[in-house]
Structure formats: structure tokens, C-alpha cells
Amino acid sequence: MSVSFHIGNLPNQSVQHALEMGRRSEELGFDGLWVADSHSVMRDAYAILAVLATQTSTLKLATGVTHTVTRHPAVLANSWATLQELSEGRAICGIGVGESAVHNLGLKPERLAVFEEKLGVIRALLNGETVEYEGKEIQMPWSTSPVPLIMASSGPRSLQLA
């Protein structure tokens, strides 16, 4: 068994603070940085992760966590494939049903059955497969480096899916 040490960001931190935290975390030997994807509470996770990918070389870069409520699965897969390429294989997709991130917008977390379907679409696209979603065939043939997906869980049903 191996142990790794990761750090996360907090609400109200400036972009500059998040970037400095990433650079400093790498200097201190942390394995990864998880950036929250919570609209209206945090800065944009994907913008921060993209910049960190260019300013660090060993730090794993993850969302803690993203969700499928406000982003189409193909958009998420595209963002992750791009981040994986930009970071040269250091991306980790922390993903869940939404919970507090969507409550802030007056939305409800994803139903587990819908989340499971969207997660399958994301996985397939990240693996360069063609997938049908909502009657449309989608593919990202340029996506060649799989992105690890780590699922957040807050209950027994989602834990079983994870």
C-alpha cells in the first residue's frame, strides 16, 4: 500500500493564491492539488488547473469534485482530455453528483441513474471510443491518454457505484 499527500483549495482564495499554493505544494513534495468545482463559491477550477499544468511538473491536478449537472458529459470529457495532454498525464477527474456545488445555483444533484449514464459517456470518450448519447454519436478520437476518474460518494448507493 502506498500513501500520497494531496492538498485542496478553499473558498474566497484568489487565482494568484491558488497558483502559488500549487507551486509551493510541489516544492514541499505534495503529490497533488485538488481544486473545488463549485460555481459561484470558487474560481473556475478548469482555468486554475490549466494554468497549474503549465507551472508545475510533478503535481497531480484534480477536481475535488466536478459534477455532471451543469456540464454536458462531452464538455467534461473534452476538458479532462485537454488537461491530461497539457499536464502530460497528471490529471485526475474527481467527480460526483453535485451536492453543494449545485445547491448554490438552485439546482438538484444528479440522480444516480443519470449520473451513471453520463459517467459511462465520459469514460468512453476519454478512451477515444465513439459513444451514443441522447441520440447523437459523439467521439473524441484525439483523446489517447486515459484520465483516472475518482468518484465522490455521500451515500450507500453512490458508494456502491464508485
Image (cartoon, rainbow, N blue to C red):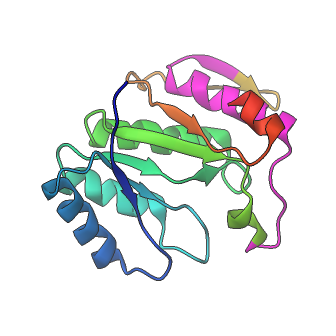
Is residue 113 part of the magenta span, yes or no? yes
Which residue is painted at 43% across and 36% down in the image? Answer: 81
Span of residues in magenta: 104-131
Asked whether residue 139 appears in the rendered view, the answer is: no
Question: Which of 109 and 28 lies nearest the eye of the viewer?
Answer: 28
Quarter of image, res 8? bottom left
Image spot of residue 56 (x, y percent): 19, 52
Question: Which of 67 and 137 lies nearest the eye of the viewer?
Answer: 67
Q: Is residue 119 left or right of residue 62?
A: right
Image spot of residue 38 (x, y percent): 60, 66
Q: Is residue 26 left or right of residue 103?
A: left
Asked whether residue 16 appears in the rendered view, the answer is: yes
Q: Is residue 112 left or right of residue 74?
A: right
Image spot of residue 29 (x, y percent): 18, 50
Number of labelled discs? Answer: 0
Image spot of residue 126 (x, y percent): 51, 27
